[in-house]
Structures are given as C-alpha cells and as structure tokens.
Image (tube, rainbow, N blue to C red):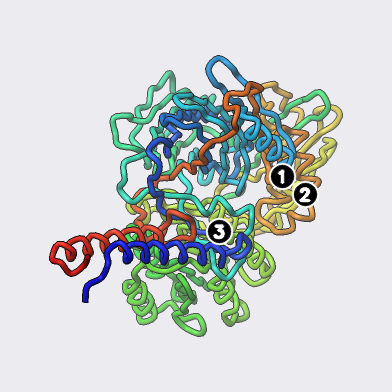
Amino acid sequence: MRVNLRNLCFALIAVAVTFTSVRAQSQSPEDKTLAPYFVVQGDPSVDQLPLKDTQVEISVAGVIADVKVRQIYRNEGSRPINASYVFPASTRAAVYAMRMQIGNDIIVAKIKEREQAKKDFEQAKEEGKSASLLEQQRPNVFSMSLANIMPQEQVEIELRYTELLIPTDSVYEVVFPTVVGPRYASPNNPAKKEDGFVQTPYQHQGQPPASSLHISAKIFAGVPVYDLSCPSHQVFPKWWNQGNVELKLDDANPFQGNRDFVLRYRLGGDQITSGLLLFQGQNENFFLYMAQPPKQVAVQDIPPREYIFVVDVSGSMEGYPLNTSKRLLKDLIGKLRPTDLFNVVLFAGDANVLSPQSLQANHQNIARAISLLEQQRGGGGTELLPAIQQAMSLPLRDGISRSIVLVTDGFISGEQGVFDHIRANLNQCNVFAFGIGTAVNRYLIEGVAKAGMGEPFIVTEEAEADNVAAKFREYIQTPVLTDIQVRSIGFDAYDLNPVKFPDLFAQRPIILFGKWRGPVTGTIELTGKTGQGDFVSRYDVGGSQPDEGNSALRYLWARTRIAELSDYGSSAEENVSEITALGLQYNLLTRYTSFIAVREVVTNPTGSAQDVNQPLPLPLRVSDLAVGSGTAVGSEPELVWLVLGSLLLATIMVLRRRRWFV
C-alpha cells in the first residue's frame, strides 16, 4: 500500500494541533497543577537569558548584616522584552529599598500595596515605559519583573536588605542563597495564584550558566574574629586587623550561583552575644535585647525519648542529598541510647512507616532501620503533609518525650499546610528539621522548626554530615532552659517580639525586639528553669546608650512582627491590614506590599514585547529528576512530542526514498 506523504504530514499536524488545543482547554487556570519545566529556546531574535550578572555586597557590623544586591539585565536580542526572574534571599531578610538605573536615569522605587503596584506596572508596560516590580512570593523567595527592555538596553536593579545574625554555640553564620530549587506542587491541592513562581523554567543538569555571580563580604566585629570559614565556596580573605576582615569569591572557579553561599565565624569575648542595642528615632524608639543562656544540664536529668525520623526519598533527593541523608540517619539512629525509642517514615508520592509503633533502640531494630534506608532510591513527588500526619498519629506512650526529625531538601510548594498541622499538634511533640542539599528550601526547614518549637539544621556538603549529626545529638540531649520569661523593670518597653519563647535546647542567646519610651533606665530580667533549678539573669539598661548606627533596628523590629503575623501560619489572611500597614509604614517588602519603579519615558510606543521567564540553574548535585514533567508550554511533554514527531517525519522521508510513500 502506498500513502501520500503530504496528506500524512497534514494529518500529523492536525493531530498535534488538536491535541494541544484540547489539552489547553481541558486545563483551566484554576485546576492546572503548577510545576517547573525545562526551558526550550524559541525565537532567536528574543534574548531568553536577559540576566547577565549578579553582584552581592555583604556588610556585617556586630550582629546586624546589611546586604546590597545588584542585578544587571541586558537585552541582547533584536526585539523588546518583558523579563521576569525568581530569586531567593534569607528568611530573615528585611528588604527596605530598591532602585532602577537605565543609562544615566536613576529611579528610586516606591513601596505600595501589592495590587496597586501590580496595576501601575501593567499600565507602564502597556504605555511602553520601562518599569521594574519586586514582589515577595515567600519570605525567602522574590520575583523581579521588568517591562520594555529595548534591544541592546541595559537595566540595573539594586535592592537592599538587612537581617539579624543569631549565633548557635558561639558560631555566627551568614547565608546568601543563590538559587531557588524546583518546587513540587501536589496535584491533590489546587494551584494558587500566588504560587505562580513554582512554574519556573530550569536549565538542564550540567548546562552552562546563564549569568555570572560575584560576592564580597566585610565583617566589622569590634572584637577578635576566629575560625572564619566558607564551606560552600572558595574565598580570599584580607585581614585589616583581628576584628576586621574582607573577602571575595574566587572568580577563577566555574559558575558558583547554584548553591548557597555560607560564611561562618566565631567572636572572641561575649560583648556581642549579650547586651542591649538602642536606636532613638523621630517618632519611635527601638531596642534589641540579647541574653546568654545557662550551660547545658546533666543528661541524667532527662526522661526517656522517642525519635521519629521522617525522610524524603523523592526524585529531587536522588544522588548526593539521599546519600547524605542515609549517612546522617545511620549516624543518628546508630547512636541512640538504649532507653530511647525510634521509628522511620519514608515519603515521596506516598508515605511508608518502618513499624506501626516505635521500636526500642537495640542492635536488631537499628540494623532493620538502616537496611530499609539503604534500599531507597530517589523518585516520585514530595507529599510531605501526609508523612507528617502519619508520624504524629503514631501511638504515644506515657512518660516519653517525643521528637519528630524531618530530613528533606524542602522542594515542595505546599508549605503552609505542613506548618498549620504541626502547630495544631504542638502538645504531642517537638519538631526538628534537617535540610539536605546545596540550595535547601530554608523557608520550609525553618518554618517547620519554628512551628514545632524546634531548631533547623542545614547540611550543604556530604562531608558536613558527621559534624552536624554530632551537633544535633548534643543539642537534643537536654533542654537548656524552659518556662522562659523576659520582663522589663523600670524600663518602659512595649510592642515586644516574640511574646512567648519556646524551650531552649542549644547555646544560643535569647532575642527580644521591642520599642521603648522615656529614659534609658531600669532592668531587663530573664527567668526560666533548668534541669537543676531556677535561672535568673538581669541586665542594667542604663549601661547602654542609643546609637545612630543601630538604625536597622526599626526594619528588623517590623520584619519580626510581620514574620509573627504571616510567615509561618495561614492565619495571615486575618492580619492582612496590619501586615500591609507595617510594610507601608516601614518601607518593607511583604506579602501585601511591593516595590515599584517606573521610568516616565516612552521607549516602546506600541507596548509590544516578548515575555521572557529567566531560566534558573539546577542546584549543585540536583539531577533533572527534580524537575520531571510540567504543564507549561515548552515543558517536557511538549518536548517529547516534538522529538517523536521529528523522528517520525525523518523516518517517513527515508521510507519515501524507498518508494513506500508518494
């Protein structure tokens, strides 16, 4: 039988068009499952990679870090583009300023209500004006949108944020996340408009980088700095004196924007970790109180404990993250005390439990758990909430202190439900979180720990696993301080954050933000209980004086209050007006306030431009399995159809030469 080639080709095209049309119509915006996808290069006249360079300057003075991030976008195509880019920051970042520069024009961004800022941006886009919009998608995930970047035009965006550095065991850590890892969006939950960032394009594993990254840091400690290290990157430190050091990334190394930048150091003395910082403003005064906790109490004073390890074995954990998890858990489980109980819950698309009830930490049960872990291979989605629910529903024995330990890279989008469930069951257990990977979703890890009144731990390198495991064991052996209360006596303090303190397990200071009125006099008193009795610490307020150098306290106080209202709880919807007011009053980026900058010059009269989503690199040692298939045009299913169609047509052409087709 002979077939007409032209008719067959038309038939194939018709089938493809019909398939695409039906598929698009069958997925309304409301029921699409958000998912990341691999970018597919299209029109060669459109620059698909407009972000060319990111420069980061970190300045640390005492316990406060101020960070300047400069992003350089350039349209190297021949058509106007509208660009969008998703990028991370610290979960504690208080973003307080943004500006845009095009040529010699510098436009300082204004803080506005989110919807109004979005309308202003869309209007500028339609009018052919250059504009930039900075929005918060998560407390640690931001999106930058730019309108009407003309061919060969360069746009420079600068944003500023500040954050408080809280030491643990006298170690300070400065973290600058460089990439947002691909988030898994559960098909069991409807897609939310604010989760649109999840549907972000990615480059394939090992693909050459799209932009360059430069990071520099300065530390002005006022006391000697010890044990300075950067486990994530190669850096060159330059010491001016023992308390003043500068450092830069080694630019000779390959692209380094696919993993968190982590800087650690210790300080000599206790001048920084204990004390009171004051700032006197025009209308309001702000303070930061930090107090050292007591030493850890004896292990024999602690009751028997139960540990339930909830372990992520999804696709994004394949390779280095899962191997590190196995090593970490073998160390933790293998060194439990004989009086301890334990269990293991594994999750990907579903959850599996080692035993219906927790087991004694004897050699036989430990070997059984380790054998189960060794069999795991990464694959599937990341259904965390059912796993947490199953872990919390396991039978609980009287007289046992239960702790749930979550081990994951955190590449999910449904964080809120997890936080809510943990918070609703706080009377059942403590919750600790281990983040494994080079670009961990710190919002999930820190949020889980905060909701469960536990502590987050991050392992960015496989070689760190043993040390972090040892640190965790030491941390959870005993609470350092319980029933914590802080009160001011003779010092008129108000608007305090936090209002309540969880049990303290590690050597880290008690932190209290607030405002004050009147004279700088009186006492701040810290009380609590240790395993050996009552603890009391008093600080003389009169020993501190207001300092203009502490102006960041107003941003940090407001950011702490916003975090309390919105970051880790769905009740944020009830506090929209207060969060919005705080963002507008203190010039801060929030879920409900955004920065908008518009250049009042029409450069693109037609307003016609190609929309471009800047693709992100996959985090270091994360495989293509973390992305899988998506629903967006240009994602894996469309690519597969394109490849199969091309192969089919090529086959037909070969067969035609053999006269099987006409």
Which residue is the site of mark 2? 576
The residue at 27%/61% (across/down) is 649
Do tag 3 and tag 2 residues touch (Cβ < 8 Å)?
no
Q: Quadrant of residue 595?
A: top right
Residue sitting nearer the eye, 243 or 628: 628
Q: Amino acid at mark 1?
A: Tyr
Amino acid type shown at disc 3: Ser
Image quarter where the N terminus lies is bottom left
Please indicate whether residue 513 sits to the left or right of residue 495 in the image: left
The residues tagged by marks 2 and 1 sit, at their Cα atoms, a distance apart of 7 Å
In the rendering, at what x and y percent does residue 529 appear? 68, 57
Disc 2 crowd, CA 10 A, few/some/many (<14, 14-19, 20+):
some
Most extreme residue toward the top is: 104
- Please, what secondary structure does the residue beneath circle 3 have? loop
Name the residue carrying label 3.
413
Question: Residue tagged by mark 1?
Answer: 592
Q: Earlier in the sequence, mark 1 or mark 3?
A: 3
Residue 548 falls in which quadrant of the image?
Answer: top right
Q: Mark 2 belongs to which amino acid?
A: Val
Figure check: 39 above or below 429: above
In the picture as drawn, the residue positioned furthest to the left comes out as: 658
Q: Residue at x 46, y 80 (%)?
A: 360
Which element is circle 1 on?
Answer: loop
Tell me the distance, in whole angstroms, between the alpha carbons under discs 3 and 2: 21 Å
Up/down of 180 relative to 483, above or below: above
**Tag 1 or tag 2, which sits nearer the N-term?**
2
Of mark 3 and mark 2, the one earlier in the sequence is: 3
At mark 2, the secondary structure is helix
Where is residue 288 shown, x and y percent of the image?
A: 70, 36
* Left or right of 630 in this view: 623: left
Residue 63 in view here: no
